[in-house]
Image: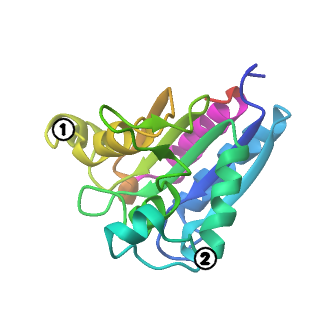
Amino acid sequence: MSRDVRTVLIVNGHPDAGSKGLCHALAEAYADGARAAGRTVQRLDVASLDFGFVSSQAEFEKGPPPPDIAAAQERIRAADHLVLVYPLWLGDVPAVLKAFLEQTLRPGFAFSYRPSGFPIKHLQGRSARVIVTMGMPAFIYRWFFRAHGLKNLERNILRFVGFSPVRATLLGSVGTCGKEEIRRRLAEVRELGRRGV
């Protein structure tokens, strides 16, 4: 067992609350591996939560979070390791996942402003794993499209509030994978959960 990772929060960012597709299966595989290694695992499906979009700077900085978001913040605070699973939509995270991140990673909870310089990071001491599914080959997303959406999530959101290290797993060509390939990928993600990375 990884010495530092005892509690894992797995966030399924798929927009369809009723979906039991690949993102759901990947989240389950990671959870299975983490539990097998003796870790405490919590699951959160973003699409099943009740919250709206942040619509102003004042709301983002000073507004009270909706109850489901406040509960999610407590789960994040309690976790040593965060796992985000989502499908790539238009080169980025789905809108509901972005709205969730804006709602949860607010000033006061995730970071605090300073009079000058970079903000204070409140979520240090936690690591993160990002698992992204996509229809295109993963190498095309990385090398041709420069993985811009993933880089934004890693650098400007997760690392900005203190998560480190932030690791990524890209699963490409998911629409054309056979059953054996899907089984192999699920086994790889289950092993990541077992290792706590």
Q: Is residue 73 left or right of residue 104?
A: right
Q: At 30% across and 63% down in the image, what residue appears?
A: 89
Amino acid type shown at disc 1: Arg
Residue 130's x, y, as percent? 48, 42
Q: Which mark is residue 48?
A: 2
Residue 164's x, y, as percent? 50, 28
Magenta residues span 177-194
Q: Across the whole image, how many numbered discs are drawn on residues?
A: 2
In the image, residue 48 above or below residue 159? below
Q: Is residue 136 magenta?
A: no
Badge 2 crowding class, 10 Å Cα cut-off, few under 14, some 14 to 19, many 20 or more, is some
In the image, residue 3 above or below residue 181? above
Q: Secondary structure at mark 1?
A: loop
Residue pushed farthest right? 38
- The answer to the question of whether label 1 and label 2 lie on touching residues, with beta carbons closer than 8 A, is no
Which residue in the structure is indicated by mark 1?
146
Q: Where, by quadrant of the figure, is residue 158 drawn?
A: top left
Q: Where, by quadrant of the figure, is residue 147 drawn?
A: top left
The label nearer to you, 1 versus 2, is 2
Q: Where, by quadrant of the figure, is residue 49 drawn?
A: bottom right
Q: Nearer the viewer, residue 122 or 176?
A: 122
